[in-house]
Amino acid sequence: MKDSIDLAADFIKMGKLVAFPTETVYGLGADATNEMAVKEIYALKGRPSINPLIVHVRSLDEALKIAVLNEKALKVARYFWPGPLTIVARLGDSTNIAASVLAGLETVAIRVPAHRVALELLQKSGVPIAAPSANPSGYISATRHEHVLEHFAGKDALVLRDKEECKYGIESTILDTTSKSPTVLRSGFITLKALAEVLEEEVLLSSSLMQIKAPGMLDKHYAPATKLRLNSTDLAIGEVGLNFGGARLLGAGSLNLSDKSDLIEAAANLYDMLKRLDDYARENNLLGIAVAPIPNEGVGLAINDRLQRAAF
Ligand code: TXA
Ligand code: MG
């Protein structure tokens, strides 16, 4: 019998879509060199065509066939790949990446994922895979197999699963290596500090409102249908709470991102808990989700970034 990853690789080669786990979030992937297949991703997600996709490859060597990595890009690639770092680099001259992936930019966002299933899929399909997060555009990203099935069951996509789900739980850090100073366009598990240490130079954090380089990052994102109220210290009537550490937004349905105030655990729980609270609020006609303050340090920066966009 054919292994499910073999079958998924056949899907990719035929120009069909495959949702697959990565160490960050689930991706909804297609052959990045197949224009028709990539267009299908945009259609299925309801994603604006101006928002470019990340190209996933199995190794640095494969990345070099697509992009021109300068010295800084090579340094971080060697250090952090496979892993939750996306590098924005200049597009190579003889690339065959589909135009829709790039949304008109002369750069490409590229990464080598660290999940066994993602790597095996890349290996077996033999092509680069363009994959945004596997959620309807603007909605909470998917970190569990059930989320993906809920969004895309019955649609024309194969959904892969694995006992290891998305261990980091938030999207990869995006580092632009084409600007004068390396600049983080989206924060993630790999922090500014970690990048600065490896690069031995200052790394900038792009201010989200000046985000012309990653157009898709401007709008409301990662958002539940239920309204979020951030930095809450009490629970209002009609709200359910999302706690962190010792916060006491207590009431029926409330959850805690990490009882022990561990930001890494909180990141891993973030989207799943937001999804559960959103479902709970909708089932019980609640008005809002109150979110406790999250320390703005380390991975907390990435968590707060997602929460702010979700509450936008
Ligand atoms: O962890 C991740 O990165 C996940 C998994 C599946 O790999 N993928 C992911 O993709 O988060 P997506 O499409 O949800 O987010 C990709 C972001 C978008 O905000 C897009 O605007 C930005 O990457 N992007 C893509 N190409 C870019 C480029 N050339 N320059 C700047 N930003 C780019
Ligand atoms: Mg996304």
Image (spheres, helix red, strand yellow):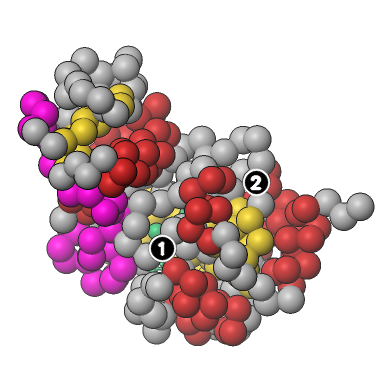
Q: Position of residue 244 (x, y in %)?
A: 25, 24
Residue at image position (39%, 33%) is 269
Q: Amino acid at mark 2?
A: Arg
Circle 1 crowding by C-alpha within 10 Å: few under 14, some 14–19, many from 20 = some
Q: Residue, x 47% and y 62% (percent of image)?
A: 132
Mark 1 residue's CB less than 8 Å from ligand 2? no
**Dominant secondary structure (helix, strand or loop) of the stretch shown in magenta:** loop
Crowd around label 2: few <14 · some 14–19 · many ≥20 (10 Å): some
Q: Residue at x 47, y 77 (%)?
A: 43
Question: At numbered mark 1, what does the secondary structure look like: helix, strand or loop?
Answer: loop
Is residue 23 visible from the viewing direction of this image? no
Q: Position of residue 105 (x, y in %)?
A: 39, 79
Query: Which quadrant of the figure has residue 196?
Result: top left
Residue 136: give its label: 1
Which circle marks residue 161 in the picture? 2
User: Extreme front residue here?
Assistant: 284
Which quadrant of the rendered structure holds the C terminus? bottom left
- Is 99 part of what is drawn in magenta? no
> Does the magenta run of residues contain 232?
yes
Residue stretch rendered in magenta on the structure = 207-236
Q: Quadrant of residue 263?
A: top left
Instruction: Answer with left or right where residue 151 lies relative to residue 195.
Output: right
**Is 69 or 224 nearer to us in this picture?**
224
Ligand 1 quadrant in view = bottom left
Q: Secondary structure at mark 2?
A: loop
What residue is shown at x 55% (from left), y 53% (from top)? Answer: 149
